[in-house]
Amino acid sequence: MTSLPPLRVAALYRFARLDAFEDLRAPLAAFCCGRGIKGTLLLAHEGINGTVAGSETAIAELILYLEAIEGLAGLEVKYSVAAEMPFHRMKVRLKREIVTMGVDDIDPSKSAGTYVAPADWNALISQPGTVIIDTRNAYEVSIGTFRGAIDPATASFREFPAWVEAHRAELEGRKVAMFCTGGIRCEKATAYVKSLGFEDVFHLKGGILKYLEEVPAEQSLWQGECFVFDERVSVSHGLAEGEAELCRACRHPLTPGDLASPKFAAGISCPHCFDARSEEDRQRYAERQRQVELAQARGRGPHIGS
């Protein structure tokens, strides 16, 4: 039996003024669905953001389609592969922000920090006195980050401005280097920090994904795996699928150590949620997991609750 070629995954974004972004939704959804593309794309006045997967031809056609839209030329795109479709459906959503910070009048297309290419990132973060900030959320950081990086321990990106304000004195007069998964959050984060009057502000171009793609493992300062928002859960160097799994009870990524914990039960609990859930909750999750396994055994694919 001939195996199917791997699917191409594209994580993309572009900060750009889209005055009529609502009008883009229906044709974009039809374009993707007509080519078997699945994933999520977000549209807002400030641009586009999302991750999608499909055949190599379909994804190439989508990128050409998006690049032809006024303002979207020069998309930031990171490619990887997946053995199976990592998304269940195609969604195009209209949003207030393509990455939600909740601060008005921040325009990364005009005031973001200095881009740093993956090849130059190690030199920057190795300089004495450089503050390295992981702008992702705590559950993402838990399975991997750069050596020496600060984890703001945020539950959502909305909390990042408050963290900066609380630690402003520690950042004064220092180089500030920020990073995130694909580049979009740290680009907006640098624009916010610069709006506060900081000058030496930098961010990793293309994010962790581009770094893992381009920097050889033997030269890397990355430790662990990078969480991704699809069924692959994580990727490692070379953008190979990682070993992390997802707790289907709380959606927290799990390391091999988490999976070995006595508090882990597939679909029911993990070390991150065991003490926060009741026995009644776990019984409910257990029944859901049983239905998932029955559906898979019957060849019906993922159960709606999985």
Image (cartoon, rainbow, N blue to C red):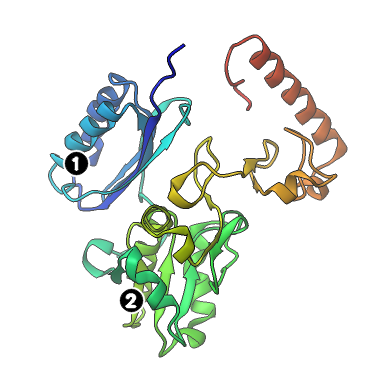
| Residue annotated with mark 1 | 20
Q: Is residue 12 visible?
A: yes
Task: Pick the residue in front: 99 or 240.
Answer: 240
Q: Quadrant of the C terminus?
A: top right
What's the amino acid at mark 1? Answer: Ala
What residue sits 35% from the left and 49% below the top? 98
Where residue 199 sits, quadrant-wise, is: bottom left
Residue 102: where, in percent of width, then height? 42, 59
What residue sits 32% from the left and 62% below the top? 205
Residue 259: where, in percent of width, then height? 74, 44
Label 2–label 1 contact, CB within 8 A: no
Residue 57: where, in percent of width, then height? 25, 27
Q: Looking at the image, is mark 2 or mark 1 nearer the viewer? A: 2
**Mark sitting earlier along the chain (2/1):** 1
What's the amino acid at mark 2? Answer: Lys
Question: Going by the image, does 196 lie left or right of 223?
Answer: left
In the rendered image, the residue lying farthest to the top is 298
Task: Pick the residue in front: 270 or 7.
Answer: 7
What residue sits 64% from the left and 16% below the top? 296
What residue sits 60% from the left and 11% below the top? 299
| Secondary structure found at label 1 | loop
Numbered tag placed on residue 194 in the rendering: 2
Q: CA–CA distance between discs 2 and 1?
A: 28 Å
At label 1, counting other C-alpha atoms closer than 10 Å, the crowd grade (few under 14, some 14-19, many 20 or more) is few
Question: Going by the image, does 261 lie left or right of 233?
Answer: right
At label 2, counting other C-alpha atoms closer than 10 Å, the crowd grade (few under 14, some 14-19, many 20 or more) is some
Residue 131: where, in percent of width, then height? 47, 79
| Secondary structure found at label 2 | helix
Whether residue 233 is situated above or below residue 193 in the rendered picture: above
